[in-house]
């Protein structure tokens, strides 16, 4: 099987066990994405499982020969948003102040807590998972240019608490 | 600031949580055993069949229902996790608890405390401290409480020995397993292994340690003797899967709630998107032989939605993911809810030690 977490061969799309194996290298990143959005380990683990199951059911929407990672992370992102909506608790409450954190981290937590889920998702994909604009675009289902704009706007939403200079030369 | 500095801040703000070691196995099992989605045409047939079944059930149902009510299903008896020399009444004791920091903004000093299980009143412990206890780190903070040692500890309650006088901790970057003896104040490295992982639970048989899966290997579980450091690899499949039953609802999700002190994995079956769908929590005594902690349906009013649990002499204490409840379960008394009062709005609690 040709997998390595990025591409998947045709046979894996027809065999449940092979399909599950092809998802496996992507799970740590999928979990990090869900955790960053939900901030609860249990819910993030639920979301990753739901996403894996839905990926299997929706495998006919996967374009053969394409990269598996953005396709799967898009499902995880969607499941995370749905889980966010389902949760009755307020996860955007002002975060705790941990004495050992630097002032910048505390400022960022505060600023992130004021963002809507979609904006937070953009920042998580780009700066927590370290994905290039092209992959952020595929996960969000927008053009690469639109992804760049969304990242730019998301960073603007953090000001004045956090002011980031974007590096135009980085993917 | 530049983007690299911002990336570093993002990691600091969100944290670098690693996924649970069982998750890869759970995903593999779930996808490999996924049943097809019911199509519209199948729905029509199923609905028609259900209507017929309802008619038939209407004739015989009442009688059957009455029989069931007079003969409730009781799970098979299993040994208690720990025998207690002095019995504690789980409904009249002090349960150490910690407020889930993401559930409500809570002052650091008030995040741990005690829940009076008779009244449900929560009292934060402002004097909680883990000063001087290993691991000596600025990140250490009160996390669990040992009634035997009468002090807060910097590790999860699951890392504490059954007698409450020692605890296990690992260095997260390199899997070095330490045991700290509270009586003597000594810390000992007892076992090391390549890779990353952590303590699952300190049970009656020893310390269960999970190694995270890598691209080359699956999850491994080791049982380490806390006295000698001898370790044996235990069969992973017995911990990371369960035997599906024909009566399980279609396409149900599941997750592990954790390993109990007897080495049984507790599973939570649910369907997140469907109100009224069956859900249950159980462990297996043998393949296919389940001991149910809870069986119900989503939205059935009980609100049981387990997050984590610990064992003590009285049974098992479960946290609730969404509500300010703590749940107690034992085979003798079944499942009971304790509603907490006196905590910040929205706060949810995690059990943090044996009730005393």
Image (spheres, helix red, strand yellow):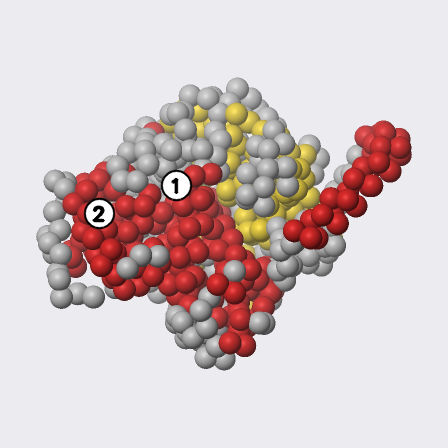
Q: Is residue B246 left or right of residue A159?
A: right
Nearer to me, A85 or B342: A85
Residue B21 in sight in this render: yes
Is residue B300 placed above or below B273 in the rendered structure?
Answer: above
User: What is the CA distance from the residue labelled 2 to the residue labelled 1?
Assistant: 35 Å
Query: Quick one: SS at disc 2?
Result: helix
Is residue B68 placed above or below B283 in the rendered structure?
Answer: above
Question: x%, y% of residue B11?
Answer: 26, 53
Question: x%, y% of residue B76?
Answer: 76, 45
Q: Which residue is mark 2?
A: A154
Residue B262 in sight in this render: no
Q: Residue at x 63, y 32 (%)?
A: B300
Q: Residue at x 25, y 42 (%)?
A: A112
- Quarter occupied by residue A159: top left
Badge nearest the viewer, 2 or 1: 2
Of all chains, the one bearing label 2 is A
Question: x%, y% of residue B282?
Answer: 65, 47
Nearer to me, B63 or B182: B63
Query: Quick one: SS at disc 1?
Result: loop
Question: x%, y% of residue B74?
Answer: 77, 39
Q: Is residue A53 left or right of residue B333?
A: left
Are dots 2 and 1 on a single chain? no
């Amino acid at each position: 099987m040709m997998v390595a977490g990025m591409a998947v061969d045709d046979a894996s799309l027809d065999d449940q066990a092979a399909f599950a194996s092809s998802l496996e290298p992507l799970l740590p990143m999928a979990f990090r994405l869900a955790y960053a959005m939900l901030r609860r380990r249990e819910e993030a683990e639920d979301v990753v499982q739901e996403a894996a199951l839905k990926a299997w059911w929706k495998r006919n929407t996967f374009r053969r020969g394409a990269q598996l990672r953005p396709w799967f992370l898009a499902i995880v992102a969607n499941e995370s948003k749905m889980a966010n909506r389902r949760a009755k608790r307020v996860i955007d409450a002002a975060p705790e102040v941990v004495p050992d954190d630097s002032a910048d981290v505390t400022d960022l937590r505060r600023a992130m807590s004021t963002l809507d889920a979609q904006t937070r998702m953009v920042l998580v994909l780009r700066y927590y998972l370290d994905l290039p604009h092209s992959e952020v675009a595929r996960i969000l289902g927008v053009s690469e240019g639109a992804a760049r704009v969304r990242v730019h706007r998301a960073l603007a939403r953090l000001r004045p608490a956090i002011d980031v200079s974007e590096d135009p030369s980085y993917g | 600031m530049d983007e690299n500095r911002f990336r570093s801040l993002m990691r600091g703000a969100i944290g670098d949580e690693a996924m649970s070691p069982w998750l890869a196995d759970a995903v593999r099992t779930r996808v490999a055993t996924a049943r097809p989605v019911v199509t519209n045409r199948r729905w029509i047939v199923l609905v028609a069949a259900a209507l017929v079944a309802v008619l038939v059930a209407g004739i015989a149902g009442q009688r059957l229902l009455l029989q069931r009510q007079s003969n409730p299903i009781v799970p098979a008896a299993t040994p208690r996790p720990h025998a207690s020399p002095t019995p504690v009444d789980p409904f009249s004791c002090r349960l150490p608890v910690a407020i889930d920091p993401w559930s409500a903004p809570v002052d650091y000093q008030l995040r741990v405390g005690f829940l009076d299980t008779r009244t449900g009143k929560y009292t934060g412990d402002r004097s909680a401290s883990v000063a001087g206890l290993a691991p000596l780190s600025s990140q250490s903070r009160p996390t669990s409480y040992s009634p035997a040692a009468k002090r807060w500890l910097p590790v999860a309650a699951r890392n504490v020995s059954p007698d409450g006088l020692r605890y296990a901790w690992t260095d997260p970057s390199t899997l070095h397993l330490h045991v700290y003896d509270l009586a003597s104040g000594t810390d000992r490295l007892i076992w090391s292994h390549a890779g990353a992982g952590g303590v699952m639970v300190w049970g009656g048989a020893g310390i269960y340690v999970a190694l995270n899966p890598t691209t080359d290997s699956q999850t491994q579980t080791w049982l380490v003797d806390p006295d000698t450091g001898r370790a044996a690899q235990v069969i992973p499949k017995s911990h990371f899967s369960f035997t599906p039953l024909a009566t399980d609802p279609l396409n149900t999700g599941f997750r592990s709630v954790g390993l109990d002190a007897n080495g049984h994995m507790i599973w939570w079956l649910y369907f997140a998107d469907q109100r009224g769908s069956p859900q249950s929590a159980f462990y297996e005594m043998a393949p296919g032989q389940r001991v149910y902690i809870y069986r119900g349906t989503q939205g059935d009013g009980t609100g049981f939605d387990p997050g984590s649990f610990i064992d003590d002499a009285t049974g098992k204490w479960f946290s609730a993911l969404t509500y300010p409840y703590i749940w107690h379960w034992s085979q003798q008394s079944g499942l009971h809810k304790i509603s907490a009062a006196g905590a910040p709005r929205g706060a949810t609690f995690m059990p943090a030690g044996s009730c005393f």
